[in-house]
Amino acid sequence: MQEEDSREAILRCALELFSRKGYEGTGVQKICEDAGIAKPTLYYHFGSKEGLLESVLSENFTELEQRLMSIEPYSTQTDIYEKDIYPVVLDIISVHFEFARRRPLFYMMIISMSFSPKDSVVAPYIMPYLKKQYDGVKAYFTQISSVHTGLKGKEHFFALNLLAMINAAIGFWNGGKGELDMDTAQKITKQFMHGIFSI
């Protein structure tokens, strides 16, 4: 097996095992067996099991971060509902849905890890990535609240709640209940939009 092939095989097997059995429930030996490599090869590429987790997170999360950053900045059109806040929220949801469809194991893994206790082994590794995701979403609400001043001070609440709605939809989809399509994204957007001006 070529060096690059062995690295990719380890990452692929680690992601599958971490997502299905949890990080702490997955041993290095099992990863090596599934990847068809010896332990020294894993340590050569990643240094440790923790280093492997960091690589799984960084190499998968980069795509989501880049997609979030590529969303068009908020453009003020306060007199046209469909062209003001609505398209930004719809884009945020759509980016997450597309990413989850492309990388379902990874997305379910980060949802699961997001509920890890603060003192767990995985918390120091997953939390910086979840913060990047949250910061990426909150940045759009900060742009919006600079125009819709009645929303100032609520950006944190909006980011958390939108991500919760997105993650719930993805979780149900993963369990065979619901779709991650444009119709679902539009319905969530409308439900979310109905709520933000009522608090």
Image: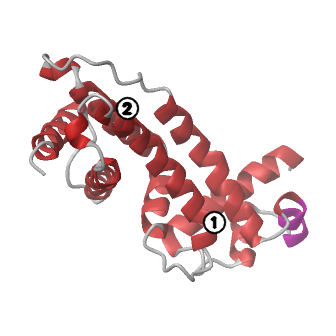
Marker disc for residue 143: 2
> Can you see residue 2?
no
Query: Viewer-proximal residue, 115 or 1?
Result: 115
Query: Viewer-proximal residue, 73 or 150?
Result: 150
Marker disc for residue 125: 1
Residue range in magenta is: 39-44
Which image quarter: residue 143? top left
For this view, does 141 lie left or right of residue 1? Answer: left
Marker disc for residue 187: none
In magenta segment, residue 29: no
Query: Viewer-proximal residue, 46 or 156?
Result: 156
Horizontal and vertical percent for residue 26?
62, 77
Residue at 86 percent of width and 50 percent of height: 1
Horizontal and vertical percent for residue 140?
38, 35
Helix, strand or loop for the magenta stretch, by majority: helix
Query: Viewer-proximal residue, 181 or 84?
Result: 84
Q: Residues within 10 Å of mark 2 (few under 14, many from 20)?
A: some
Three-letter code for the amino acid on which mark 2 is drawn: Gln
Horizontal and vertical percent for residue 168?
27, 57
Task: Give the structural element (helix, strand or loop) at label 2.
Answer: helix
Q: Looking at the image, is mark 1 or mark 2 earlier in the sequence?
A: 1
Horizontal and vertical percent for residue 10?
73, 58
For this view, does 161 lie left or right of residue 32? Answer: left
Number of marks in the image? 2
Residue at 31 percent of width and 58 percent of height: 171
Q: Nearer the viewer's eye, disc 1 or disc 2?
A: 2
For this view, does 86 lie left or right of residue 174? Answer: left
Residue at 18 percent of width and 33 percent of height: 186
Tell me the CA gap for discs 1 and 2.
29 Å
Task: Give the structural element (helix, strand or loop) at label 1.
Answer: helix
Looking at the image, residue 156 lies above or below residue 196: below
Residue at 20 percent of width and 49 percent of height: 178
